[in-house]
Image (cartoon, rainbow, N blue to C red):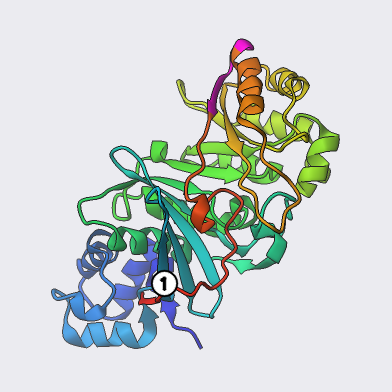
Amino acid sequence: MQKNLLLNYTAAEIQELVEESGQPEYRAKQLLEWLYRTKITSFDDMTNLPKTWREELQEKTDISPFTSFSVQISADQTRKYLFILRDGLAIESVCIPMKEHFTLCISTQVGCALQCTFCLTGKQGLFRNLQAGEILGQILAVQRDISPDATISNIVLMGMGEPLLNYAQTVKAIRRMLAEEGLHISNRKITLSTAGIVPGIKLLGQEDFIINLAVSLNAPTDDLRSRLMPVNKTYHLRQLLQACRDYPLPERRRLTFEYILLDQINDTPEHANTLAAILQGIRCKINLIPLNPTSETPYRPSSEKTMLAFQEVLLKRGYSTFLRASKGADISAACGQLSGKHRLTPPRKA
């Protein structure tokens, strides 16, 4: 039987744990600081807590959600982490170096049920949802592994899985990211990427926090999008785009639409013009993403000339449109390439 994971506890639940243990109230703050500020991995390191209580905590709870992890480093210095969970399943996270900080893409599920035809994660199906502590644990583990002077300032829930199909645990994790006694990350620095789960988008817009929303669109018509992304058969473009229009964006903030360009599938000027038409009235930016091919998907990436022509159409129609460079493709760390498969790299103790 697995021990309880401390990272699953809210601040209120940590307080209850302290009270049930007969410890003074201030121990809750100390414990939270050890978990989220110093990011330790051993109860022995919690030197300002009584030894007897540390032993009690160790007997009943775990600090890390992982038994081990391994890292692959790309030629562009992108780092891909393979984490082994306590039940033996595996997930991946990707840490991308930017000019002055790191962006970390984290997983919310083991596998994915959506079966988008261009994505390797969906090929394996869904094994289970991650707990909030398993989502948070990725951030803490990567921060420990990179240089102490480096800062992970941007979090993207865009690794393995669909965050809005693990809604309760994803939101619980986001609250710990935002909380002052948690990771204390700005809501402007957290982005949730979805394939278009309309009820989840509506629920997210009703929360007492607002984070950035990115929608994986990839086609401008229902017929094409349903072929590429089966989820569109449940939540059609009209429903999805209405949910996007209703999402409560603060002033000067924009939604992001992600569009993976597939050679001779969704990359013509006609597709670009149709895309511009359906997004009319939505305050947004568009990220054009080159396909990261794998042997298990049937598509080819669009040529640079085609991608630039697609971008030019959107720019002329008044949309802020960016052609994103792939990061980490040489270690299968780019968008659509995460699989959670075990790699022959030396594991490290989590």
Quadrant assignment, res 142: bottom left
Task: Looking at the picture, tell me which residue is in the foreground, 215 or 166.
Answer: 215
Q: Residues within 10 Å of mark 1 (few under 14, many from 20)?
A: many
The span shown in magenta is: 316-322
Residue 314 visible, this angle: yes
**In which quadrant of the rendered image does the C terminus lie?**
bottom left
Q: Which residue is mark 1?
A: 69
Q: Residue at x 41, y 70 (%)?
A: 70
Task: Looking at the picture, tell me which residue is in the foreground, 62 or 143.
Answer: 143
Task: Looking at the picture, tell me which residue is in the foreground, 339 or 66.
Answer: 339
- Residue 59 % position (x, y): 34, 88
Q: Residue at x 55, y 30 (%)?
A: 255
Q: Which secondary structure, mark 1?
A: strand
Amino acid at dot 1: Phe
Q: Is residue 59 above or below residue 161?
A: below
In the image, residue 329 lies in the stretch drawn in magenta:
no
